[in-house]
Amino acid sequence: MSQGRSVNPKFDTREVDRWIGVPLGGGSMRDPVHVNDIRRWAQGMQNPHPLYFDEDYAKASRFGGIVAPQSFCVCTDDSHGAAPAIQGAIPGTHMLFGGDEWWFFGPRILPGDRIRQDRMLFDYKVTETKFAGPTMFSRGDTTYINQRGEVVAKQRSTSIRYLAEEARRLAQFNETEDPQWTDSQLEEIERLKFDYYGTFLDLGHERRLFVKPGEKLPARPIGPHTLMTFTTEWRSYLMTVWGAFRASGGPSSLHQAGWLPEMSRDLEGAKIDPSLGDGLYKGPSRGHVQPRYAQLIGMPRGYGYGASMGAWIIDYLTNWAGEWGELIHSRMQYRSPALTGEVTYLNAEVKGLSHDDPSGQPMAHVEVTMTNHRGATMAQGTAELRMPTEVKPKPVC
């Protein structure tokens, strides 16, 4: 993505230019990761894999105890990993997630770990969209590092920054009413969820072997989404806990990026009432669960978090690979949000296998699609997973 400056009076990006390549500050966790942080994350992401919450089950795993899912990295940041892509003031703008690219380097996050982040705006471009006219697609990097100095993962997040006034005028999303479901339809959705959960519970602690090109991953349904499920997701992010993060030093313009007054945090008031600064009651995320503010920024009703969409995908892939597999890289584009009342479906297919990884393990190349219940594409992309091989027998003495 090349840099594309805009000097449109309504969308002037000159303030953004000076932040490219600048090491950024932000918040860092005050306390080490607690096992209940991991449990709460699994619950919030609607991922009932017992490896992430059941101590007895996890003790029998290769890890010997509860381990964080690979998706948990984003939970250790104070801004969904998106802050580096929201730098420089453009008045009257809001943002949506446009996608994530992840690289994982091997270390897993365990209870007791301390994770810090390095952050930097990578690049941006401005283009015309049907959604909001002049729109910026900016990319920023967040690198996650543990207390031993090991790089756990790197996230390149894409933020879509746009003029809220233009999004309201163009009204691309205008269905303000939730779809309605019959009791029998809801029962069928629950049955499909149980079928999906059974696929990783049946694998258990075994290795997923004999993966072939053309193999389809089991479908994963999520939903129907509600204001309650979105709130539960939000509260699973550690950054939403009062006092859980502290400023780590270094510059950042995240809170002066040009947010609408109604979508800005009241940081002074938060010194008295912390809810004024947590982002959900008052702040950039309030539109997710308050339809009035969703419509202010061009959304029709309550809508889901891009970071959660990314977590759903990562959990989906790693649940399939099993505890002996590992997600190495993924690159996903987000096209439309999860809206209240909708059901999300994840599907994927193994497109190929390669055998040139230094570990000697096969690499599965997977194509992922996320759709809503009407079949509209919400996200899509590709991923590479390192798959297990048979255990070599011990030599006979």
Image: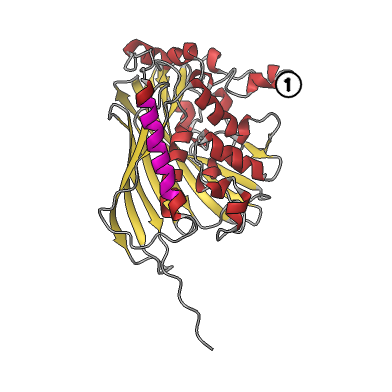
Identify the magenta region. 185-200
* Callout 1: SS: helix
Task: Work out which residue is located at the far bottom of the displayed protein and give it.
Answer: 397
Q: Amino acid at mark 1?
A: Lys
Farthest residue in the left direction?
214
How many residues crowd mark 1 within 10 Å: few (<14), some (14–19), many (20+)?
Answer: few
Q: Which residue, given by chain and number where applicable, does mark 1 sit on? A: 271
Tell me what residue is drawn at x 28 percent, y 26 percent: 374
Residue 85: give x, y in percent of width and height: 48, 34
171 in magenta: no
Q: Residue 336 versus residue 144: which sits nearer the camera? A: 336
Q: Is residue 279 above or below residue 383?
A: above
Residue 191 falls within the magenta-colored stretch: yes
- Name the side, left or right, on which 53 lies relative to 202: right
State the image coordinates of residue 233 (x, y, percent, origin top left): 53, 31
Q: Is residue 94 something one can see in this rendering?
A: yes
Specify the quadrant that holds the C terminus.
Answer: bottom right
The answer to whether residue 122 is visible is no
Quarter of the rendering containing residue 378: top left
- Magenta segment's dominant SS is helix
Judge by depth and name the residue closer to the eye, 184 or 314: 184
> Residue visible at 35% across and 25% down?
185
Query: Total label count?
Result: 1
